[in-house]
Amino acid sequence: MDKPSQPAVADLWYQDEPAKHPPRRIPAWASFIAHLGASLAGSDAAPTTVALSVPVRDFVAVLAATAAVIRRDQIAPMAPDDLTSHIATLRETPIGAPIKYLAPKDKVHDGRWQGFEISPFDRTERLCFELRRKETRKLAVTQALNIRLTGETQANGQLQARTISTPPLLRAVRGESAAVTFVTTYRCDVMLVGTLSVLEAEMTQERFYADGVIDSPSGVLQDLARVQQYRDAKRFYRCVTLASASEAARAQMEAKPCLVVYDGARAFLRYRHLWALSHRLVVLDRSAASSEDAADELAQDYAYSQGDSPLLQRFVIPAGFEAVAYEGAQ
Amino acid sequence: MNSLDAATRFYHLAVDWQASSVLVEHATLERFSSAVGELLKEVGENVEDDYWASIARPLRAARWRLATIPLAVNSSAVGVQAAADLVVPRLRRCRFISPGLADRADALADQLEHLWACGDDPLGDAVRAALDSDDHGGILLTDGRSAEAVAASFGGHRVLTAAELMRTTFPHVVAAGPSAWFPRRILQAPRAERFTFAHFGWIRDREPDLGLIEGSGTMLWNGFRAPPARAERPEQPVVEALDFVPQFDWGAISRVAHRRSADAHGEPVSAQLFLLASGQGVFLETREGAKAIIAELEEGIVVKQMSVVDLSVGAYLVVRTEGDADYVRVYADQLLGARASHLRTLQTRIKRRLNAEIEDHGVALVARKLRWIGSPIASENNLRRWADPANIRTNDYADFAALCELIQESDPKSLWSAMGEIWTAHIRAGNAVRKLLVAELRNADTTGLLKDGWADYDVAEIEGEGALRVVRVTGRAPEPTDVPRSRLRKAFSIGNDLWLG
């Protein structure tokens, strides 16, 4: 359960131009987009396509992707919260798997999982893992929640220990403990296809606030989305981008994101055939001539779908949008 | 990138915009427009004949310009006099060609002679009145070619085309022509609070259809208010806006294009004719796999290859203004340096010998021979592609070795390696040209490109004459045609007599 004090992406605040006034809530259209991204990420229905037409594409794809990433982290956290199930997971974890050990004072140690063993002193079970300089730690199983699996299959390079600083906005949205796990683990929850330079600017240049006071925790969407190709997220990420003008790499094609966000007609026309098991959000900019071609393709896709999805029924769609949702096409 | 605030403004515009129409009346122009329509109706299918086609094209074009350029009737940008110079003598000859229509033709010739001296500016006056004291209003034209002349007449107001409008915002835009003549995205994604469509009263606009996504449960705001119905005038019927738009006369354009082929050389190849916003045409080869380089401007600037079969109206094609039209080859030769001459000689020798074989024995027999020698994929189509002088080498060495054996080249391995050098240079050249052009486009002001539909970019790194021209495709011929190879990719002027859209 989220604590009430943790805002969702749809509840963020921003500062208008010039920045003379306190932050204000993001506009209704942006809030709708964030809710939509989170809903798609949380949907366990058949692969669902939501197509939107918008008067301008700015921030639509990045807000949806960010909200989807955060939603995925809430419903399928890489940070364990159930001791019994986490111990069960560790029992199935292969020896040598990379782990993070969360020590006091925000210290995070890289480590390799060594398995369980019985202590010769008190005959109780211990968790064993190796840290840097071949140091072996053995903890009581009650401390298992401080051991996090990174998602990697192999530990690359040297093991390190460092103090992790998490972005304030991320801490506000996810809480201290989850934020540390968030920035030290990786998974591709969202594939974002579009023009990389534009997406990067939107992810990293506009400042958002956790609430309406100027000194509240603030940051950029990249702090929450952790796009692999942008700053500070190369190794530990939750979102991957693909340039709509470039060839997809094998790793991108083989990714299994929960949600694919197509930012613009070119992205959809070029990569609509990939990631058949993922939900899709297609953003068409009505100011672009190429959107007509993409809309034709979508109409065909819709015609062969299994029918309308109820997903949009829970929203009041703000004026200025066209929207359709359907299940099981491609 | 817009800020979140700036993006929000577009959402407000999308639900607030209003559009109205101003109907412009001018009895002389209405009679002229109606007379053109009546004459062409009487001519019927004969309009395809050379005589009538040479009259119909300039008349339709003049009628179109009168309805879309807010300048005086006798302004050179409207071009009534130029049209009259062409058409009036032909209309006067009608008595000897089609006596039944002579009276109508004479009457129309009289009207044209009167019009070219007419200094009235009804459309311009209407646009001016609609702008009123609005200092920040923009003037929207269907075509950027007359933008400069219109801007000179409306000092202080920005004159723009739809492509430009989509990149800015205005409080008020006055469009010269009914809404149906503009891309529907100007109202689907409005960039102004208020639109006024000034058009002649005898042209009926239609209610714009704004929906883009089929099945959408929400409708877009439609602030378009249709003008009040005009009183019926039985003698001068109202014309639907879309029926007024002139169509390309592909037959005439194709004939002109072929006349210009007289001094061309090389074997005939199947090619598609494209019309360009620069008032030019260009032939592009249609063989399977043939590519053209295009620039995309809408979603960031991208320069990439596209199959000629997929090239459609609205795309921005990259051609060279002068010199060797194959600029990738020119740049590849620069990369090859001193080796280029020797390598190209080898390439030419292989192609010449292979083509001689095909000429002597026919493509079917040569393909069979190649398969017998050991080529895995020597079909007739593949053989034609390999014999193409622009082709460098086969994909598979086994095919290349078979070709060399057939044409009695004794050292296929060294030839394969030499052709590999050319191939690599072409790949590098293609990538380099793309990067150079993207850099040019990013640094340049693209206003002219969006307004006029074309602009030249002098890429200093590519040696020889001629800049790279990025130009919007305005038409695609319905059928491919055969042209000499030397005509491919070279843009040529179509001439003012032919309508370019």
Image: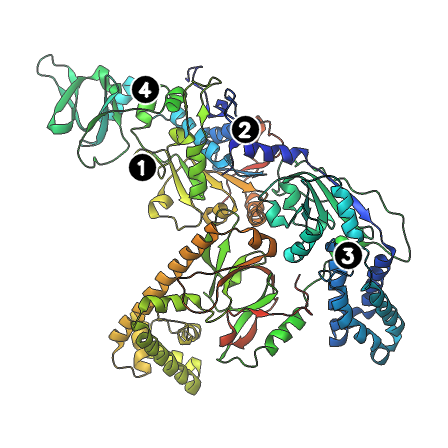
Q: Name the residue under label 1.
A: A234
Question: What chain is tagged by disc 1?
Answer: A
- Give neighbour class at mark 3: few <14, some 14-19, many 20+ (Cα, 10 Å): many
Q: How far apart are marks 1 and 2 (CA)?
A: 29 Å
Q: Mark 3 points at which residue?
A: B72
- Amino acid tagged 4: Ser
- Amino acid tagged 1: Lys
- What is the secondary structure assignment of the residue under circle 2? helix
- Amino acid tagged 2: Phe
Q: Quadrant of residue B222 in the image?
A: top right
Q: Distance between the residues labelled 4 and 1?
A: 21 Å
Label 1 near label 3: C-beta < 8 Å?
Answer: no
Q: Are marks 4 and 1 on the same chain?
A: yes
Label 3 near label 2: C-beta < 8 Å?
Answer: no
Outermost residue on the right side: it is: B234
Quick check: A50 above or below A125? below
Question: What chain is tagged by disc 3?
Answer: B
Q: Distance between the residues labelled 2 and 3?
A: 50 Å
Q: Name the residue under label 4.
A: A177
In the picture, measured across the screen, residue B383 lies left or right of residue A310, that is: left
Of marks 4 and 3, the one in the foreground = 3
Q: Distance between the residues labelled 4 and 3?
A: 74 Å
Residue A152 seen from this side: yes
Label 1 near label 4: C-beta < 8 Å?
Answer: no
Measured as percent of width and height from the top left, residue A41 is found at 45, 31
Q: Do labels 2 and 4 share a chain?
A: yes
Q: Mark 2 points at which residue?
A: A32
Q: Do labels 1 and 2 share a chain?
A: yes
In the picture, measured across the screen, residue B45 lies left or right of residue A278, that is: right
